[in-house]
Image (cartoon, helix red, strand yellow):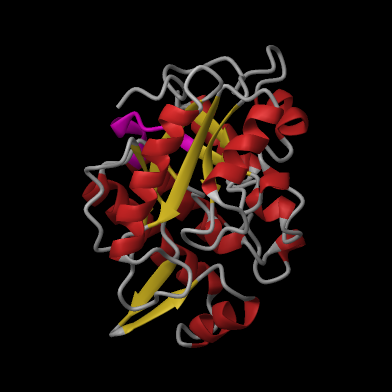
């Protein structure tokens, strides 16, 4: 599916946001409220996303029936706002989701869980859960990161998405190295191995500002070091807000986009 962005090495920065959430999953606003805000801001395209169904954890995702209703509503909004803004229906598909995504306009592969035995642990829900998971790995946060990167690799191979979501979500609670040192050679080697495995697919890597908007971080995912590694090897970056409320659409784009490509202000 051709979304019109994230293609080639240096697409122009435009008012496009392909990672947003609504009341059909864990967002705060309805799809129409998000679209109305996007129109007000003069956006060219908004991608309304839904967390697809994970049967072991239904607190944040859409139900199978909810997904059908979401697709019907986004279809209505496409027609209703035609000529004002392009509306797309996106699936944020976790490695462990059981949703058929064939009816969506595009897919973001995003890993939110690490599975140990029969248990699933969310890496982005709370610092306490992350520490609980690390405790099962001898408190080795870098080993935890290695497992996370392996899951991201598996998800991209299995899903073949249009966008690779928040590549290093495992660092959500690691502002200023609070939990572990991201410059550690083990961590850097694991992250770079993952990027090297994913680059041949030619899929854009998302630069996600959502954790900044929600006060967990002061910089987007992935880290500046990993973004530089991706760019140096010819990879593509695509800027998304992961907005869960209308106020956070395109959050931080004006500030971050020039730093992604200082000479042209593109990503």
- Residue 260 percent across, percent down from the top left: 66, 27
**Picture quadrant of residue 255:** top right
Q: Is residue 96 visible?
A: no
Residue at x 64% of width, y 50% of height:
210
Residue 40 belongs to magenta span: no
Q: Is residue 207 above or below residue 237?
A: below
- Residue 139 percent across, percent down from the top left: 55, 83
Q: Observer-nearest residue: 26 or 95?
A: 26
Stretch in magenta: 198-205
Image mark count:
0
- Residue 228 percent across, percent down from the top left: 59, 33
Residue at x 72% of width, y 19% of height:
262
Residue at x 63% of width, y 36% of height:
36
Q: Observer-nearest residue: 267 or 32?
A: 32
Residue 200 belongs to magenta span: yes
Q: Is residue 160 above or below residue 41?
A: below
- Residue 41 percent across, percent down from the top left: 71, 28
Q: Observer-nearest residue: 186 or 220?
A: 220
Q: Observer-nearest residue: 31 or 156?
A: 31
Residue at x 28% of width, y 63% of height:
64
Image side of residue 64 versus residue 168, left or right: left
Q: Is residue 14 visible?
A: yes
Image side of residue 38 versus residue 254, left or right: left
């Amino acid at each position: 599916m051709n979304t019109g962005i994230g293609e080639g090495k240096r697409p122009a920065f435009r008012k496009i946001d392909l990672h947003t959430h609504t009341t059909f999953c864990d967002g705060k606003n309805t799809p129409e409220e998000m679209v109305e805000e996007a129109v007000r801001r003069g956006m060219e395209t908004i991608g309304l996303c839904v967390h697809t169904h994970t049967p072991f954890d239904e607190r944040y995702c859409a139900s199978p029936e909810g997904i059908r209703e979401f697709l019907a509503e986004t279809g209505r909004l496409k027609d209703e706002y035609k000529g004002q803004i392009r509306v797309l229906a996106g699936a944020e598909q976790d490695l462990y989701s059981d949703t058929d995504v064939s009816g969506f306009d595009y897919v973001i592969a995003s890993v939110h869980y690490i599975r140990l035995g029969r248990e699933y642990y969310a890496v982005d829900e709370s610092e306490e859960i992350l520490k609980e998971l690390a405790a099962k790995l001898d408190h080795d946060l870098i080993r935890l990161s290695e497992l996370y990167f392996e899951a991201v690799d598996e998800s991209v191979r299995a899903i073949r998405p249009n966008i690779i979501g928040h590549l290093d979500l495992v660092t959500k609670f690691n502002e200023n190295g609070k939990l572990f040192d991201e410059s550690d050679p083990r961590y850097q080697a694991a992250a770079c191995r993952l990027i090297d495995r994913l680059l041949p697919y030619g899929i854009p890597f998302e630069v996600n500002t959502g954790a900044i908007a929600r006060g967990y971080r002061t910089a987007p995912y992935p880290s500046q070091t990993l973004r530089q590694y991706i760019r140096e090897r010819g990879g593509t970056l695509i800027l998304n807000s992961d907005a869960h409320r209308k106020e956070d659409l395109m959050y931080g784009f004006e500030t971050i986009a020039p730093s992604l490509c200082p000479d042209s202000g593109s990503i």
